[in-house]
Image (spheres, rainbow, N blue to C red):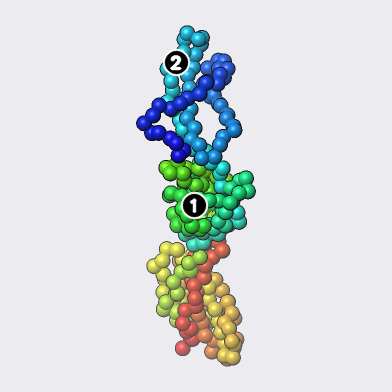
């Protein structure tokens, strides 16, 4: 690549002949393939093609394709994916060797790719130099698939390296609802009635009611009420006690996120 003349004619060698055969198979257009080996590091290769049906009936040249070949970098090791709330965090170890075991002499970049629902993998932005990535363009409860490929740059040419195994992750909702407000309690003939303000948050799916009696260190859950109800009747309060009540809110996540308890209220 150090000897390339951008304005000089490309010194193509002698052509390699590949049998063509029929252009279609069972009504479908056939696809040709050519594999080459014995490539040398730090060299740029150019290819073009012609088709012919005889020595006197050949096509003109195809477009020219080219690439720089270099011993590729190894696969990023210790690839981990950690789902969070509306995000997925990815991490891996830096690549320090090429696939032949020799030490990397150039800067290694990493291309993160993602697939949604079994669709084709799409690159998430440009290749990066750091060994971690946070994908915030995700939806909770949806499964995503990730892989990372190492690469190096030789001037403007990209040398792609090893690709990690595919790992999936499903971000989850970890944000609890707001604390219930307006918790009150009143004694009735049927029991102690606990009620609270109905929340404006459409994500609230239910409420839990807790009771604490004098001398009790921690409250105990005594019931759960689904929306839109905002009242609970405690029919099992110990006689002669003056219990304290608190309420928490639950969302519809699996498992549900629970808010912190409301201030305690007692029956008047």
Q: Nearer the viewer, mark 2 or mark 1?
A: 1
Q: Position of residue 148 (x, y in %)?
A: 53, 49
Q: Is residue 216 positioned above or below 248 on the image?
A: below
Residue at 46% in and 13% down: 58
Between residues 240 and 71, which one lies in front from this camera angle? 71
Q: Which element type, helix, strand or loop, lies under badge 2?
A: loop
Q: Position of residue 20 (x, y in %)?
A: 55, 17
Label whose residue precedes the other's in the sequence (2 or 1) = 2
Residue sitting at the far left: 7
Q: CA distance from mark 2 to mark 1?
A: 42 Å
Q: Which element type, helix, strand or loop, lies under badge 1?
A: loop
Between residues 223 and 200, which one lies in front from this camera angle? 200
Residue 175 visible (yes or no): yes
Name the quadrant containing residue 17.
top right
Residue at 49% in and 62% down: 85
Q: Position of residue 159 (x, y in %)?
A: 50, 43
Residue at 60% in and 49% down: 102
Residue at 44% in and 23% down: 62
Residue sitting at the far front: 3
Q: Position of residue 162 (x, y in %)?
A: 57, 46
Between residues 120 and 17, which one lies in front from this camera angle? 17
Q: Is residue 151 positioned above or below 82 on the image?
A: above
Residue assigned mark 1? 107
Q: Which mark is residue 59?
A: 2
Between residues 233 and 139, which one lies in front from this camera angle? 139
Q: Characterize the local packing of mark 2: few (<14), some (14-19) or many (20 or more) Cα atoms within 10 angstroms.
A: few
């Amino acid at each position: 690549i150090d000897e390339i003349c951008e304005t000089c004619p490309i010194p193509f060698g002698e052509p390699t002949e590949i049998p063509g055969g029929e252009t279609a198979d069972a009504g479908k257009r056939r696809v040709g393939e050519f594999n080459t080996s014995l490539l040398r590091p730090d060299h740029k290769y150019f290819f073009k093609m012609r088709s012919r049906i005889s020595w006197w009936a050949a096509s003109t040249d195809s477009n020219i394709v080219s690439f720089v070949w270099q011993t590729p970098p190894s696969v990023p090791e210790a690839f981990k994916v950690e789902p969070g709330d509306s995000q997925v965090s990815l991490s891996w170890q830096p690549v320090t060797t090429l696939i032949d075991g020799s030490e990397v002499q150039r800067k290694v970049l990493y291309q993160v790719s993602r697939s949604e629902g079994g669709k084709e993998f799409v690159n998430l932005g440009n290749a990066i130099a750091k060994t971690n990535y946070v994908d915030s363009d995700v939806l909770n409860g949806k499964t995503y698939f990730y892989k990372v490929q190492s690469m190096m740059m030789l001037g403007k040419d990209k040398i792609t390296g090893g690709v990690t195994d595919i790992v999936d992750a499903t971000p989850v909702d970890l944000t609890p609802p707001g604390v219930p407000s307006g918790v009150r309690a009143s004694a009735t003939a049927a029991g102690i009635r606990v009620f609270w303000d109905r929340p404006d948050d459409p994500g609230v799916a239910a409420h839990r009611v807790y009771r604490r009696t004098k001398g009790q260190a921690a409250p105990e859950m005594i019931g759960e009420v689904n929306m839109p109800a905002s009242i609970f009747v405690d029919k099992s309060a110990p006689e002669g006690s003056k219990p304290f009540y608190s309420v928490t809110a639950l969302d519809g996540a699996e498992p549900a996120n629970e808010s912190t308890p409301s201030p305690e209220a007692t029956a008047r």
